[in-house]
Amino acid sequence: MFAKQRVKDIDLKGKRVLVRVDFNVPLAEGSVTDDTRIRAALPTIRYLIDHGARVILMSHLGRPASAEDLSHSLRPARRVLQRLIGRNVAFAPEVVGSEVEEAVDRMVDGEVLMLENLRFFPGEKANDPVFARQLAVLADVYVNDAFGAAHRAHASIAGVAALLPAYAGMLLTREIETLSRMLAAPERPFVAILGGSKVSEKLGVIEKLIDCVDTLLIGGGMAFTFLVAKGVEVGNSIVEPEWVGPAGRMLTCAAEKGVSLVLPTDFVVAAEVAEDAETRIVGREEILPGMKGLDIGPSTAELFKGEIAAARTIFWNGPMGVFEMVPFETGTKAVASAVARNNVAASIVGGGDSVAALKKFELEDRVTFVSTGGGASMKLLEGVPLPGVEALLDEEA
């Protein structure tokens, strides 16, 4: 299913191992506010330490304006990692160059060194071959454990992997195997729930899912583009006019393949997106001009909950509304709770907003698998090759 060589295939003793992790974590006042991605990398990091590797960690964080933008430094992530693994993590204030090379030369077996934010250097996103070579000289072996960035052809993802023996970390392996298995051999009924604002970002995923799911529940802002394709007036709700035609074709395709594609029957509407907005619940054909649909309504929530309860495989990506605001959180909370309550199904949640919703409603420990990569998981489900995976060594025959 995942025909790439893995970290456990390496003789690690004394090896300098350059590990691409995804420590793109949220910060507030210089502290990490959610350490999920750091925790996800721990199995690989601990395995490398326990087997005598000299572990060099690299990651991006946010979109810094320049190397002087210290609000995007990885130092807070280093502090969290030290606490989690219970040992010192050395820190290099640079990513490449003589000082970093000297720091690597001083390392001993089992030691960990974290490099500064890769995106402080333009060569990272540009996949600059010179920058990739500067990274590669630091190590004997490369390990990619950053599934959340595996869809990007950046220097630390694709460039350096072409210059060193390149292996998959444990998190990357688990992510790909879980998502691939879901598509290839789901227990049925297989119910997929898609939300978020834009059909354009998920049309490829919808096309793929229609080939393998039994039921597809559509919520969030993207539902309105589908409703317009059915001739429904949706007031001032978000619509992508250029995607109405493709949405209509997806409706036809689902019907032809016997897939139940379920759209909301009612909505919570308001004139503006605000915490103190005056809201109403209306049927989907009753949204007046000037009003916006900002959450699925109670009838839709009950409909979706019934489908989720009957499922034996569940995939959820995208909220049902503007769940960050209390007036519009109920639909997303209902879906999250329904997924969490179904303890006989394999439940897979992907995407930053869906994961944020699970955390908000304190349900993240009640699903089978939470993907760390929103964009990467969508590309994988579409069947698009991921540069970070393609660059790894193939399994030996």
Image (cartoon, rainbow, N blue to C red):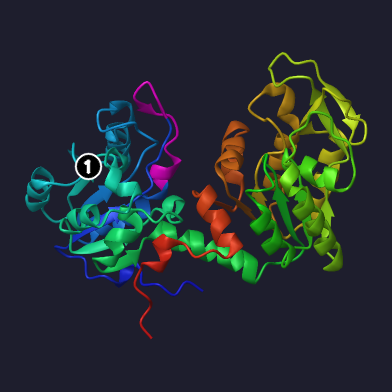
In the displayed structure, 187 sits above or below 71; it is below
Q: Nearer the viewer, residue 187 or 201?
A: 201
Q: Residue 159: x percent and y percent?
A: 30, 59
- State which quadrant residue 258 falls in: bottom right
Is 361 situated left or right of 370 in this image? right
Measured as percent of width and height from the top left, residue 262 is found at: 83, 50
Taking the view exactly as shown, the residue that stands out farthest to the top is 276
Q: What is the secondary structure assignment of the residue under circle 1?
A: loop
Position of residue 173 relative to residue 217, above or below, is below
Q: Which residue is mark 1?
A: 87
- Crowd tier of the residue under label 1, counting other residues whose Cα lies within 10 Å: few below 14, some 14–19, many 20 or above: few
Count of numbered marks: 1
Q: Looking at the image, is 155 positioned above or below residue 239?
A: below
Residue 57 visible in the displayed image = yes
Task: Kindly identify the amino acid type of the residue bearing the numbered disc 1.
Answer: Arg
Residue drawn 78% across the image and 48% down it: 244
Q: Which residues are magenta?
A: 27-39
Residue drawn where x is 92% and y is 31% of the image? 286
In terms of depth relative to the viewer, which is nearer, 377 or 171?
377
Q: Is residue 33 magenta?
A: yes
- As drawn, the residue found furthest toward the bottom would be 397
* In magenta stretch: residue 366: no
Viewed as shown, does residue 148 lie left or right of 207?
A: left
Residue 5 drawn at (x, y percent): 36, 72
Q: Tell me the quadrant of the picture where the C terminus can be found.
A: bottom left
Front residue of this view, candidates 371 and 95: 95
Q: Tell me what residue is drawn at x 39 percent, y 35 percent.
A: 63
Could you tell me if residue 7 is visible in this image?
Answer: no
* Residue 181 x/y as whole percent: 59, 68
